[in-house]
């Protein structure tokens, strides 16, 4: 049963990611991201939950729910923090999501978190992972 739930969690995650990236139906993206996250809560570990909350936060930003996005991004970072030695890309990705949510919410600390995210991206050892996370943060601009 847990293998089936894992497959469904991964499948709905991939669909949610594509829907968030497409940007044409933020409610559908949010529904898929929430479904995936809830499935990962049943069978996943802290890394699964960090990644699931990251995508859920992005979907919340797209659906114009920035305060909820900030909370989901904080959950993502908390799950990353619960991992003994989290991958450098996971740390950078979590900071990217938190910066995105803070910027959407107009929070004062957004620029500081954005700078931390950019520094974390620069520190990613794998070139491909660094480029992928850098492409995800490329549309973020510091607030005035």
Image (cartoon, grey):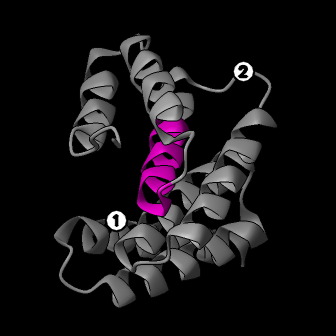
In this rendering, the answer to whether 61 lies above or below 85 is below
Q: Which mark is residue 95?
A: none
In this rendering, the answer to whether 141 lies above or below 130 is below
Q: Which mark is residue 17?
A: 1
Left or right placement of residue 102 versus residue 103 in this view: right
Residue 104: x, y in percent?
42, 60
| Residue at image coords 44%, 33% | 114
**Residue extent of the magenta highlight:** 93-106
Assign a secondary structure to mark 2: loop
Q: Quadrant of residue 90?
A: top right
Quadrant (top left/top right/bottom left/bottom right) for the N terminus:
bottom right
Q: Quadrant of residue 115?
A: top left
| Residue at image coords 81%, 37% | 82
Residue 46: x, y in percent?
74, 47
Asked if the magenta segment contains residue 96, the reply would be: yes
Left or right placement of residue 58 versus residue 71 in this view: left
Residue 4: x, y in percent?
60, 76
Q: Which residue is mark 2?
A: 85
Q: Residues within 10 Å of mark 1 (few under 14, many from 20)?
A: many
Assign a secondary structure to mark 1: helix
* Magenta residues, dominant SS class: helix
| Residue at image coords 53%, 55% | 54
Q: Residues within 10 Å of mark 2 (few under 14, many from 20)?
A: few
Left or right placement of residue 76 versus residue 114 in this view: right
Asked if the magenta segment contains residue 32, the reply would be: no
Left or right placement of residue 46 versus residue 124 in this view: right
Observer-nearest residue: 53 or 4?
Answer: 53
| Residue at image coords 40%, 78% | 64
């Amino acid at each position: 049963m847990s293998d089936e739930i894992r497959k469904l969690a991964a499948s709905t995650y991939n669909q949610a990611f594509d829907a968030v990236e497409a940007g044409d139906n933020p409610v559908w993206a949010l529904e898929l991201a929430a479904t995936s996250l809830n499935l990962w809560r049943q069978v996943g570990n802290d890394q699964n939950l960090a990644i699931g909350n990251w995508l859920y936060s992005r979907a919340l930003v797209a659906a114009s729910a920035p305060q909820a996005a900030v909370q989901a991004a904080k959950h993502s970072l908390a799950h990353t923090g619960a991992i003994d030695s989290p991958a450098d890309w996971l740390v950078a990705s979590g900071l990217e999501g938190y910066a995105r949510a803070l910027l959407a919410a107009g929070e004062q600390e957004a620029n500081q978190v954005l700078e931390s995210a950019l520094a974390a991206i620069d520190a990613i050892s794998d070139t491909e992972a660094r480029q992928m996370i850098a492409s995800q943060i490329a549309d973020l601009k510091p607030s005035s």
